């Protein structure tokens, strides 16, 4: 699959993801813009190609934006099931070597409870926090 930025040039308004339950959509242009901002944010957090991050999200378009931001930056990511219990989530975050743990706004309270049990270099970030920082990041 080509990176969304390639499709954004030729078919920017084409829907790339459609959430069946809500009907919300994401176009190639929106995905490219969001993943670019996300990649800038990941770099501003000190992540570099080859680093690892963990994601904890319910079904959301934001998940795809973050995955593509990681891909565009050469960062590995581990998606964690929302059906796991706190101890299992903490184990996975530590085992995958995540330097950053990104969670949806809805799961932020769980991440805050997990913070003391996460490995030292792991920083927990909510999607809202990421939005604020990404809005301040320059375009690549």
Image (tube, rainbow, N blue to C red):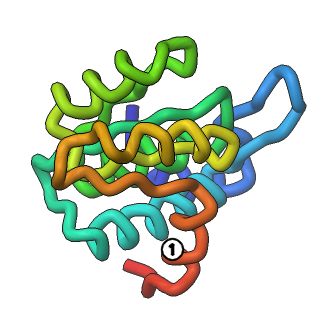
Relative to 80, residue 27 above or below: below
Name the residue: 37% across, 78% down: 140
Q: Secondary structure at mark 1?
A: helix
Q: Which residue is mark 1?
A: 134
Name the residue: 39% across, 70% down: 41
Relative to 70, residue 110 above or below: above
Question: Which residue of the protein is positioned furthest toward the left in this rendering?
Answer: 50
Q: Going by the image, does 106 lie left or right of 42?
A: right
Q: Position of residue 37 (x, y in %)?
A: 48, 69
Q: Position of residue 49 (x, y in %)?
A: 14, 55
Determine the image quadrant of residue 104.
top right
Q: Is residue 10 visible?
A: no
Relative to 79, residue 65 above or below: below
Q: Position of residue 113 (x, y in %)?
A: 48, 40
Q: Is residue 140 visible?
A: yes
Name the residue: 32% across, 56% down: 123
Name the residue: 77% across, 29% down: 19
């Amino acid at each position: 699959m080509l990176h969304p930025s390639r499709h954004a040039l030729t078919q920017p308004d084409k829907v790339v993801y459609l959430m069946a339950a809500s009907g919300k959509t994401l176009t190639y242009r929106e995905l490219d813009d969001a993943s670019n901002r996300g990649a800038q944010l990941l770099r501003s957090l000190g992540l570099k190609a080859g680093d690892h991050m963990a994601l904890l999200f319910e079904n959301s378009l934001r998940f795809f934006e973050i995955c593509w931001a990681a891909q565009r930056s050469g960062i590995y990511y581990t998606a964690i099931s929302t059906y796991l219990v706190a101890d299992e989530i903490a184990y996975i975050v530590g085992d995958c070597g995540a330097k950053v743990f990104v969670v949806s706004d809805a799961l932020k309270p769980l991440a805050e409870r997990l913070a003391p049990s996460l490995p030292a270099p792991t920083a927990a970030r909510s999607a809202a926090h990421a939005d604020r920082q990404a809005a301040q990041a320059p375009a690549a």
